[in-house]
Amino acid sequence: MQENILLFFKNAATPFLDQIAELITMLGEQYVFILIISYFYWNISKRKGFKLAVAFLYSSLLNALLKLAFHAPRPFEKLDFIKGKRVETATGYSFPSGHTQGSTTFFITLSRIIKKKRFTVPALLVILAIGVSRVYLGVHWPVDVIGGWVFGIILAYLFCAIVDRYYDEPEKLKLIFFRIQGVVLCFSAALLLLDLFHLHGSMKIEDFFKLSGISSGAVYGFFFEMRYIRFSPENGGRAVRFIRFILGLAVSVALMSGTKLILPEHYITDFFRYALVGLWITYLWPAAGLKLKLFRAEDPSL
């Protein structure tokens, strides 16, 4: 059945549809999520930005662990008649689809934040289209996409519920996410030791370490900011908000891409590179922005 679906898309493929599918699948990639999360966190609401970040990051981390557990090959690796397209985005194992799960969690969380039908319907269509694009491109089996949708929906509602329930109780919120991140770091250490002393680079763990790094920087940075900085994203006119968003985003991209040119290519350096990006978004840029008068401190009376 799955092979028949892949064969259908192969026979239906045209250069134009290839371009459309690649554009759609790009909506499920990291730069889109970083851009939207950063905008919400810096310019709209720390609460909403944090909710988007933790839902997406922890959904993606679970996805990376599931990929390692199932160890499933991708269609273009197993079927001779499938030639994968945009395979540079297919860096790990196959089940479940990371693009599908991450975008499902993200856009459902975003629709629960915006709470408007005119956004929810297009968001659901984007989620559907991203999943289909992964099968069309030959980088995922249909079951990978279905799994991504299921896990993505469950985790979106789970993390929305956690943040909504405990955001106004910061000590409890911190305890929950420090424990979650502690588990993530334990898995990181275990995978590192397993790879260094047994697997010797034979397992695809790079994506997990990138996600472990950025979630560490973002989560710990968020609670540092909550304790020591306490900036207000609601302050500032349109020009100020635009400037602080563009400057902050430019540094985020520079940290993500520029440091890759300096540091040796390895999942350990990826961990620290992405950790710096997460820390920049939630803590370092708000701290620097206060000094530059691009942000204001929260009203202590509120």
Image (cartoon, rainbow, N blue to C red):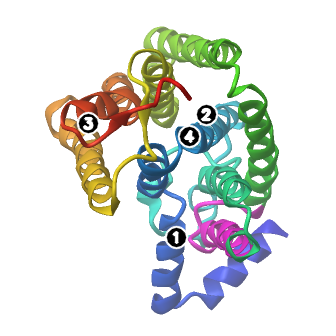
Circle nearer the N terminus (3, 4): 4
The residue wearing badge 2 is 61
Circle nearer the N terminus (2, 4): 4
Residue 156 picture location, percent across and down: 74, 45
Helix, strand or loop status at disc 2: helix
What stretch of residues is rendered in magenta?
121-142
Q: Kindly give the residue lying farthest to the right in the view shown.
A: 1
Residue 111, above or below 203: below
Residue 125 picture location, percent across and down: 70, 75
Circle nearer the N terminus (2, 3): 2
Q: Pointers 1 and 3 in contact (CB under 8 A)?
A: no
Front in this rendered view, residue 43 or 94: 43
Q: Which mark is residue 192?
A: none
The residue wearing badge 3 is 289
Numbered disc in front, either 1 or 4: 4
Q: Pointers 1 and 2 in contact (CB under 8 A)?
A: no
Front in this rendered view, residue 206 or 165: 165
The answer to whether any part of residue 277 appears in the image is no
Helix, strand or loop status at disc 4: helix
| Structural distance between the alpha carbons of marks 3 and 4 | 20 Å
| Structural distance between the alpha carbons of marks 1 and 4 | 34 Å
Instruction: Identify which amino acid the numbered label 4 is placed on.
Output: Ala
Q: Give the residue drawn at x 51%, y 65%.
A: 27
Quadrant for the N terminus in the image: bottom right
Q: Which mark is residue 53?
A: 4
Q: Kindly give the residue lying farthest to the front in the view shown.
A: 301
